[in-house]
Amino acid sequence: MVYETVPRTVRIILLGEPGVGKTSLILSLVTEEFTEHVPPKAEEITIPADVTPEQVPTNIVDVCLAEQSLEQVSEEIEKAHVICIVFSVDKQETLDKVASYWLPFVRDNCADDFRKPVILVGNKIDLIDYSVLDNIWDIAEEYPEVDRCIECSAKTLTNVSEMFYNAQKAVLHPIGPIYSIEEQELTERCKKALSRIFKICDLDGDGLLDDYEITVFQKKCFDTPLQLQVLDEVKSVIAQNIAGGIENECITMKGFIFLHCLFIQRGRNETTWTVLRKFGYDESLELSHSYLYANIKVPVGCTTELSYKGQQFLTQLFEKYDRDKDGMLNPTELKNVFSCCPRVPWHNLRYTVPTNDKGFLTLQGWMCRWTLMTLLDLQNTSAYLAYLGFNFLENESQKIAIHITREKKVDIAKKQSSRNVYQCHVIGPRSCGKTSICRSFLGIAHKKIKPHANERGDGYSTENCCINTVVVYGQEKYLVLKEIPITRVSDPLQPHEVNCDVACLVYDVAASRSFEYIARIYIKYFAESHIPVLIVGTKGDALITRQEYILQPEVFCNKYQLLSPQLFNIKENKHDIFVKLATMAAFPQFQAAWILFSKHRHLKHFASLAGENSSWWKAGIGVAAATIMGLVLIKMLNFQRR
């Protein structure tokens, strides 16, 4: 079934046999008095938004078969949002025509996949002293589009305004998507939506809504607190009507869903719809596109990171679902986190972020994975924040969870990056040890390394990526290593494979032709760029082979003013290389100072933990010294060139 979006103007059409009182109902609503002599057909009237309960302009259209053809009536049905079929309660034949003619006629003029809501209106109840509603339920069961039945009197004004209000509600708060009249219960889509809402509002994750959580829910949905007496009455109703609805004086999910079923059965569709829309649902009970995807524009040269608000929300979410409080999310806990989402968005976490020995996600790994998704797939981050309730709990859109960094060219001009997430591309020929470096960054032992697909994507995939934290000058930063898969040495690099914060060019010290590839890559793509480069020789425990290239690695680095080649041995699994890469990304224009730092091994100071009291002033002295020595070296080099 397809449902229309909520219209800005509600259009109501009145159908029925001649003489049932269609025109009288319209005139009684407008004039608030009964007129004995009425025209055959009332002119279309518009009721302003400020005088309607739902604050929506409403057009009311009268139909007269004596003045209109069936084709014209069909056109009016197509334009209408809701149809009121009126019959006279004192004339059975007019009720019979509702089922035998008017309902089939309306259905024939509606699309097969969209049936407009119908209100059955029994007029002239002032003429009888009994109700005819029992005679209508069979009709309603045969035609699910019948939203409700109402008895009224245009003469005494009984239920006249209620009739039109219910017609409005049938459009603005349709019953079809949320309740099955045949089964007398909520639809599966509605249950699924309410289950997600319950989980979001269950702030402590214990599977119950306590008084505080119910108060927060009530205030955010309806802008008014729930009185304690009313709350006790609600609990009493739930307890009396459904087993397991109340537990430890708290409302269970079963009770929460029952409560909304009760609202609808009592004609209070608007209550459930208010809740559903507050949590982003449209008329098809799907989360709307505008709710899922915040309008975040990222200028060229900028990147996206989690803001403090975003980090705080995600940390609280981790703690909520870490039920055993061991500081990790096991597979069951991780599945529970995303139980209100279409699917778990991540796979192969062991080879992407830090985990424990069993592959369980730590808080550090959790934040790393969200950071990586925010950097490479902002749309997905926006959607999953919405699925998990960020919009509701923070009362703002996902925009405030995202920080947009300044342009890269500004960082280059200032010779210091303002970013907290650095992208490092690991480039080298096949089998040179790129994967070993990436896995070593996550602390994975050599024997556990498994091969993975070497497909070249579009630059936005998280395949071949891993992320971890490093400490630079006492501040925690995120470093993303992206392995650039190379099928053939002759393949050119694409722009998205070159553009990064720092490049790690890898060669195998035991393979005589390995260095030639990265030397050519450096000259072709990086020599004239602002991207800092670190050359790394893998298999450092092996016998170093002379490279078949015009310049040996050490000489090559000296010529291009690069740091000396860094030897890497996965068995030692040293963290120095990753600190160097992150620090080079943080200060991309200090290559000369880096040469001095490398020679004097000052880089060890950069890995000092933030908790050491002396690290801050030591780092400050180191930065100042590096700057001075770098400037001196640059002047000396310029002097020698003259």
Image (spheres, grey):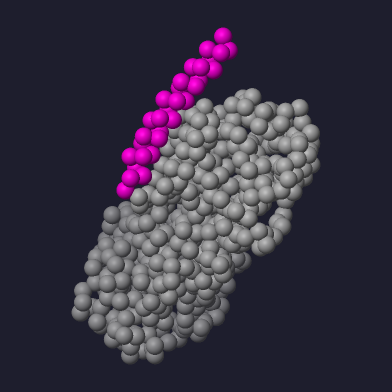
Res 516 quadrant in image: top right
382 w.r.t. 278: above or below: above
- Residue 581 in sight: yes
- Is 106 or 364 nearer to us in this picture? 364
Q: Residue at x 43, y 75 (%)?
A: 324
What is the magenta segment's predominant secondary structure? helix
129 w.r.t. 446: above or below: below
Q: Which x, y percent locates residue 265?
A: 39, 80
Per the rendered image, the range of residues in magenta is 613-642
474 w.r.t. 41: above or below: above
- Is 197 or 114 nearer to us in this picture? 197
Q: Residue at x 72, y 42 (%)?
A: 544
Q: Residue at x 35, y 52 (%)?
A: 611
Farthest top residue in view: 642
Determine if the magenta segment contains residue 401.
Answer: no
Quadrant containing the C terminus is: top right
Q: Which x, y percent locates residue 139?
A: 51, 81
Quadrant containing the N terminus is: bottom right
Q: Which x, y percent locates residue 369?
A: 52, 56
479 w.r.t. 330: above or below: above
